[in-house]
Amino acid sequence: MSSNNVLTCEIIAQETPYVTRNCSKCKRITEFNCSEKFRVNANQKMVDIWLIYNCIHCEGTWNYPILSRVHVNKINSILHEKFMNNDQETSWYYAFQINQLRKLCKDVNTDIRYELRKEYLGSMTNETTIRLCCKYDFGLRIDKLIAEIFDISRTKVNKLAQDGMLLLHPKINMKNKITDDIQITVKGDWYSIDTLT
């Protein structure tokens, strides 16, 4: 296969996952969204840092613990500055720590809006590589994304995989979650350039 026959698909999250937990003001289980703001509390040389979440129904908040009772000298100075300045990229990094959030919340809603940005290089042949780029892991399944790329059903995606027309690198299951830099080899002439671009 020519290295020029590559379609890069970048999955760009448009929002952070919601968390579900008890709201002390609403007096019930409800959803909270990430405020993209940190709370930093320093007691002499010891620092506590939280990421603030807001209840979607009231003014209630929940503080997601990031660092607890850490000596200021043990925090990277650049990271500390990002906490102090409410750096959005840093807040999103922590907002996508799904496994950690699930330990602290009743649920984490990862069904979020995302944009699929495509860039195709080369001319269509009987074999093309799709490279997936995904900065944040939010539980999007490979078969769901492939179905979206080709505008076909998940059943058709799984049939094509069984028939050897779609090969995953590394060799993982179609139902696995997307991680950065998964590659899909597409074989045959069942697709068109118009679908991919």
Image: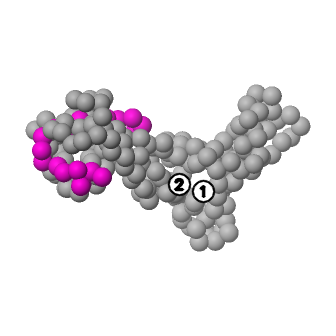
- Residue visible at 23% across and 38% down in the picture: 128
Residue 34, which numbered label?
Answer: 1
Pointer 2 local density, CA inside 10 Å: few below 14, some 14–19, many at least 20: many
Percent x, y of residue 168: 26, 34
Is residue 170 positioned above or below 95 on the image?
above
Residue 185 drawn in magenta: yes
In which quadrant of the rendered view does residue 76 lie? top right
Residue 167, which numbered label?
Answer: none
Determine the secondary structure under disc 1.
strand
- Residue visible at 41% across and 41% down in the picture: 133
Who comes first in sequence, dot 1 or dot 2?
2
C-beta proximity under 8 Å, tags 1 and 2: yes
Asked whether residue 79 is in view, the answer is yes
Pointer 1 local density, CA inside 10 Å: few below 14, some 14–19, many at least 20: many
119 or 108, nearer to the observer: 119
- Residue visible at 46% across and 51% down in the picture: 12
Residue that numbered label 2 is attached to: 16
Residue 100 drawn in magenta: no
Determine the residue located farthest toward the left in the rendered image: 163
Asked whether residue 147 is in view, the answer is no
Q: Give the range drawn in magenta.
A: 179-197
Q: How many marks?
A: 2
The quarter of the image holding the N terminus is top left
Check disc 2 and give the amino acid type: Thr
Determine the secondary structure under disc 2.
loop
- Left or right, 185 with reference to 33: left
Determine the residue located farthest toward the right in the rendered image: 44
Percent x, y of residue 187: 16, 38
148 or 31, nearer to the observer: 148
